[in-house]
Amino acid sequence: FGMMSYDPAFTNTASCSSKITFIDGDAGILRYRGYPIEQLAEGASFLEVVYLLMNGELPQKKALDTFAHEIVMHTMVHENIRELMDGFRYDAHPMGMLISTVSALSTFYPEAKKIEDAENRRLQMVRMIAKIPTLAAYAYRHRRGLPVVYPDNDLSYAGNFLNMMFKMTETKYKPNPAVENALDVLFTLHADHEQNCSANAMRGVGSSKVDPYSALAAACAALYGPLHGGANEEVIHMLHKIGSKSKVPEFIESVKKGEGRLMGFGHRVYKNYDPRAKVIKRLADEVFDAIGKNPLIDIAVELERIALEDEYFVKRKLYPNVDFYSGLIYQAMGLPMDMYPVLFAIGRTPGWLAQWEEMLLDSEQKIARPRQVYLGYDQRDFVAIDKR
Ligand code: CMC
């Protein structure tokens, strides 16, 4: 291939430098801006984490209040977007609706194209972080055939999302504090993960200098794929299929024979316990104490126990990943499975945007344009259609 390096799927090529997220897959370490994920999940609110990702430092109290206020001011979406949502079929997948409406937002904010203007860039970033839960909840209500609930700006970021999803009566909706906290932590755990498929899409599409709504729609589209944001749903299907704790050993044997994968296990980067999975496992207990247990948890815990002692999984360094327990919490909260990737998208939006801005300000970056190894025909002469 001459002087060119050939690296399909970029498994060994750094496409950028970044100061945002650090992963050590062998040690099971994840840090945002240097802070361990466990400490942020325990002590920081999601909006603090968003501020940290966007600005590089944790906010002082006053800066956080100002930032939270800015977000609240932008949670509403134009009524035409709601009408656009109405045009989808009753059974449209919420991820399809999310991708389309995020992309449609670019037409409402044509000034978003001025990406070289720092203040304008920040305004669009705030808008996207504020509006994505509203779009997500609208998509859910559309599927259920329910009228939309407008944002309630007295509530927290997670509380407002729960309100827009589940409010049924005229009385003020009070989110369950354990569920509200769990959702906030889940958003934090999903907020960034360096150069995954969707972040790479955000950077690649954004490198053409398109407006950020269009680039964000591309990132959401990448996340929609089953190899990326869809694994938590597969875990629930698998646990249903296994059916009971006593069937777990039999299922593990079938995986070892190559009859299927243990979903929610294994990771391209982590060759140790995914630090996010540890936090989610604890969180699941808190949620189940508050709103009732998801009976599938017993099967999941038994699966993990047996797999972690089994030579097949030990030798291949296969541990639970972020998706192993998150679906169990979402299911207990009453969320339908096709909303799981939508929740992932809400949490990941600040990571995508922080990386997008970092790329724009990086003087070494240009339009993303990889090369290829051509394996087709050498030159040959054209033959007219009646002579072929
Ligand atoms: N169950 C059983 N065996 C597995 C599994 C699994 N979940 N994952 C990997 N292996 C085996 C695989 O068969 C191979 O064995 P051998 O060396 O004998 O051929 C070895 O482990 C290495 O696997 P690989 O496919 O080369 O590893 P990869 O880095 O390409 O794949 C993965 C990573 C996440 C795609 C894979 O582990 C997998 O399919 N896991 C299940 C799906 C899943 O949970 N995905 C969520 C990923 S994390 C969040 C996200 O990105 O959204």
Image (cartoon, helix red, strand yellow):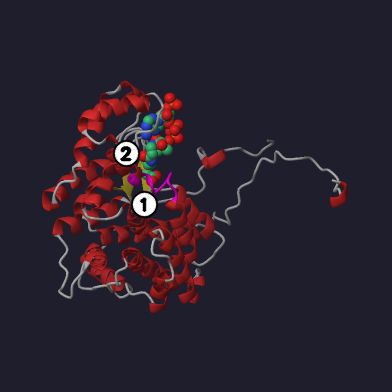
> Looking at mark 2, is its residue's CB closer than 8 Å to ligand 1?
no
Q: How many C-alpha atoms fall within 10 Å of the one at disc 2: few (<14), some, or many (≥20)?
A: some
Q: Is residue 231 magenta?
A: yes
> Residue 192 got which mark?
1
Residue 32: percent from the left, percent from the top?
33, 50
Span highlighted in magenta in the image: 225-233
Q: Is residue 288 left or right of residue 232?
A: left
Q: Residue at left 29%, top 57%?
A: 49
Q: In percent of the image, x 32 and y 42: which residue is there?
A: 237
From what the image shows, is residue 157 above or below residue 388? below
Identify which residue, 190 or 356, lies in the foreground: 190
Left or right: residue 207 versus residue 295 is right
Asked whether 146 falls inside the magenta stretch, the response is no
Q: Residue 14: image x %, image y %?
A: 50, 43
The residue positioned farthest toward the bottom in the image shown? 79
State the count of labels. Answer: 2
Assign a secondary structure to mark 1.
loop
Q: Is residue 35 above or below residue 247?
A: below
Gap in Å between the C-alphas at discs 1 and 2?
Answer: 27 Å
Based on the displayed image, in which of its 4 quarters is residue 62 positioned? Answer: bottom left
Q: Compare marks 1 and 2 and give the one earlier in the sequence.
A: 1
Q: Up-down: is 261 above or below 256?
A: below
Q: Report the front residue among 227 and 334.
A: 334
For the stretch drawn in magenta, what is the main secondary structure? loop
Query: In what element is the residue under mark 2?
Result: helix
Three-letter amino acid code at the position of disc 2: Met
> On the image, numbered disc 2 is attached to which residue?
238
Q: x%, y% of residue 270?
A: 36, 36
